[in-house]
Image (tube, rainbow, N blue to C red):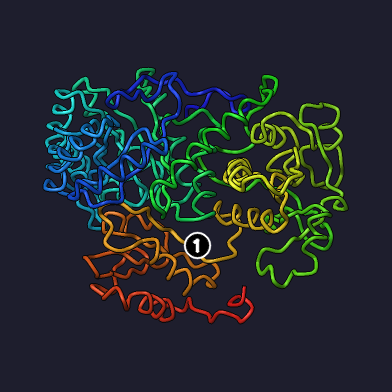
């Protein structure tokens, strides 16, 4: 397996060819581009033009529009004309699922077409079937017949393309050969790329989106390693996104873990933060994420290292540390990842622990006995490795090098039996007036990325000076990384023109009814495109089936159809009850 980045300890941006989307250049030496997607009905020209102008004013550089049928795609002509009449030449991207004829229509009017290899031609039926090599090749020939005309039209008109695979929407053919895996995601995209390249068409980018940051990170790493293995001219730009990230802090944290960790390894040329909120709120988060990366990678680089990674970057396994007992709690050795706080933060919340619910401080840092360790100090590393018993270690405060690279180096040089306490920053914040996003993004990126690589037995938030906010941030990062599940997990897609109900208000109602169901995963999907496949590993699904009608799922199986929207939340809770996943909310949880 090829490496996915040239140096795991020193930032280097992945070199790519330049892909032009209208007048916007992606890849090469260009900045990371920020994009978003319209939530308005594509048939409503006036609403789409107004929303797109608002996104551009907020800093959006590329605007995506759903085009679910040829009729919808035809109105892209009028949306484009309306924007040009307003003096705006922002590139438009048509988002295509299931309908090759819609893609052909859209390519006449917009600068870029996004296709999903999992459903561009294949109809997903969740069939279990073994494909012989001949049958598999017959399917590829069928894909070519449908895809080649689009490639030729894009060549003729100078259009770009995104070959964007989504976890959970892989075709039955791919599923039955590779499973619902990151490897299957990559192979699905490469099939389409080979067809494009056979026609000497190269103006395309890739994406590998998933709602689970671990799956997303692994898929992109496999993609980049696979592109490198294909040859130096497979240097196509990468679009990053965590699909169905959700809303509020959770959506921002999940996005920062997935997108931020890859940007930190030099992967990513354009990003979209998918929030279940008005699209305009995605832009400042994406911009702040790019700024946060620049600040972190601008720190003094570690000296060049020859140490191999302590983990397999293509397969998650938690680092096998030994158990250390601190203040009555186990750290490492398979114990749950613990939450450290400073003495000052402990003092600030000690009188209201009951009111904090699940957000409990667990270990006081100053009296914990954890050992600050310089991973560049050969003598210090040797001394720790010579200890007979495991010892919890961490980076020292004032450490000036990038956090992720430094903890990677620590894990590579120190025996695995010594548990590692992760800090979001080695420069504790002293002001509670700092905007919360400024603390959230680097904390989620640094700690979340390391947790997804299996590194870390405890976490300590130092970039957020407010005690309550710091605790909430620590636990929400653990939840988003899939490391410590302490509350209901929601997979909520962002609104778009396909959405069949108000995602924001509906998600809020579902949270209110189910927010106490610890460990239950619920998907809230606006339409069938983001339906059974995109729900990935959710336990239950609430999916728009038709205007005003909801379908309910258990896993990927639809079990109730065409429920009136007014009844759907109650029917969802009944479904959860019938499958033995329901508990009544305790009075304490209801009062918080």
Image vertical order of residue 185 relative to residue 376, above or below: below
**Going 38% across and 55% down the picture, which residue do you hit?**
493
**Going 72% across and 56% down the picture, which residue do you hit?**
339
Closer-to-camera residue (331/107):
107
Classify 10 Å Cα crowding around label 1: few (below 14), some (14-19), many (20 and above): many
Residue 81 image offset from top left, x and y in percent: 17, 35
Can you say which quadrant of the picture contains the C terminus? bottom right
Residue at the spot of label 1: 489
* Helix, strand or loop under label 1: strand
Image vertical order of residue 396 relative to residue 170, above or below: above
Image vertical order of residue 326 relative to residue 564, above or below: above
In this image, 273 relative to 396: left or right? left
In this image, 465 relative to 160: left or right? right
In this image, 304 relative to 13: left or right? right
In this image, 582 relative to 223: left or right? right
Residue 217 image offset from top left, x and y in percent: 48, 41
Q: Is residue 448 visible to us here?
A: no
**Going 21% across and 19% down the picture, which residue do you hit?**
200
Residue 211 image offset from top left, x and y in percent: 43, 51
Q: Quadrant of residue 110?
A: top left
Q: Farthest residue toward the front? A: 86
Closer-to-camera residue (223/106):
106
Closer-to-camera residue (314/268):
268
Q: Is residue 10 visible to us here?
A: yes
Closer-to-camera residue (34/234):
34
Residue 450 image offset from top left, x and y in percent: 62, 42
């Amino acid at each position: 397996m090829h490496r996915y980045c040239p140096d795991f300890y020193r930032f280097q941006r992945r070199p790519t060819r330049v892909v032009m989307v209208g007048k916007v250049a992606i890849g090469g030496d260009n900045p990371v581009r920020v994009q978003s997607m319209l939530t308005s009905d594509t048939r409503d020209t006036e609403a789409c033009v107004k929303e797109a102008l608002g996104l551009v004013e907020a800093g959006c550089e590329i605007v995506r529009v759903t085009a679910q049928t040829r009729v919808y795609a035809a109105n892209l002509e009028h949306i484009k004309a309306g924007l040009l009449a307003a003096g705006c030449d922002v590139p438009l991207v048509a988002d295509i699922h299931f309908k090759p004829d819609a893609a052909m229509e859209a390519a006449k009017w917009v600068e870029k077409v996004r296709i999903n290899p999992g459903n561009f031609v294949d109809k997903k039926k969740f069939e279990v079937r073994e494909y012989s090599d001949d049958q598999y090749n017959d399917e590829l020939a069928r894909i070519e017949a449908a895809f080649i005309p689009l490639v030729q039209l894009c060549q003729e008109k100078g259009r770009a393309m995104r070959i964007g695979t989504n976890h959970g929407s892989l075709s039955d053919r791919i599923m039955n050969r590779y499973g619902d895996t990151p490897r299957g995601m990559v192979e699905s995209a490469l099939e389409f790329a080979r067809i494009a390249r056979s026609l000497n068409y190269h103006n395309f980018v890739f994406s590998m989106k998933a709602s689970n940051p671990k799956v997303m990170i692994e898929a992109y790493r496999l993609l980049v390693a696979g592109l490198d293995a294909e040859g130096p001219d497979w240097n196509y730009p990468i679009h990053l996104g965590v699909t169905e990230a959700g809303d509020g802090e959770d959506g921002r944290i999940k996005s920062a873990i997935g997108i931020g960790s890859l940007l930190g390894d030099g992967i990513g040329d354009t990003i979209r933060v998918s929030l279940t909120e008005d699209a305009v709120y995605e832009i400042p988060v994406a911009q702040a994420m790019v700024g946060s990366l620049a600040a972190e990678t601008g720190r003094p680089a570690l000296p060049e290292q020859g140490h191999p990674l302590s983990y397999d970057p293509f397969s998650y396994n938690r680092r096998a540390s030994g158990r250390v007992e601190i203040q009555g709690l186990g750290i490492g050795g398979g114990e749950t990842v613990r939450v450290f706080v400073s003495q000052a933060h402990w003092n600030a919340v000690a009188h209201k622990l009951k009111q904090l619910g699940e957000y409990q401080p667990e270990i006081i840092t100053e009296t914990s006995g954890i050992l600050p360790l310089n991973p560049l100090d050969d003598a210090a590393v040797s001394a720790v490795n010579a200890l007979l018993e495991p010892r919890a270690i961490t980076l020292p405060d004032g450490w000036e090098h990038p956090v992720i690279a430094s903890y990677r180096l620590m894990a590579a040089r120190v025996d695995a039996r010594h548990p590692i306490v992760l800090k979001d920053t080695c420069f504790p914040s002293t002001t509670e007036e700092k905007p919360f996003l400024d603390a959230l993004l680097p904390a989620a990126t640094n700690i979340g990325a390391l947790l997804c690589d299996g590194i870390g037995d405890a976490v300590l938030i130092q970039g957020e000076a407010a005690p309550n906010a710091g605790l909430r941030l620590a636990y929400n990062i653990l939840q988003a990384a899939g490391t410590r599940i302490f509350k209901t997990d929601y997979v909520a897609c962002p609104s778009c023109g396909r959405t069949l109900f108000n995602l924001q208000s509906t998600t809020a109602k579902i949270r209110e009814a189910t927010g106490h169901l610890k460990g239950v995963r619920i998907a809230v999907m606006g339409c069938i495109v983001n339906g059974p496949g995109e729900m990935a590993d959710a336990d239950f699904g609430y999916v728009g089936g038709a205007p005003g009608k909801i379908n309910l799922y258990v896993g990927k199986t639809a079990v109730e159809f065409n429920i009136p929207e007014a009844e759907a939340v109650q029917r969802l809770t009944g479904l959860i009850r019938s499958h033995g996943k329901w508990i009544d909310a305790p009075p304490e949880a209801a009062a918080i």
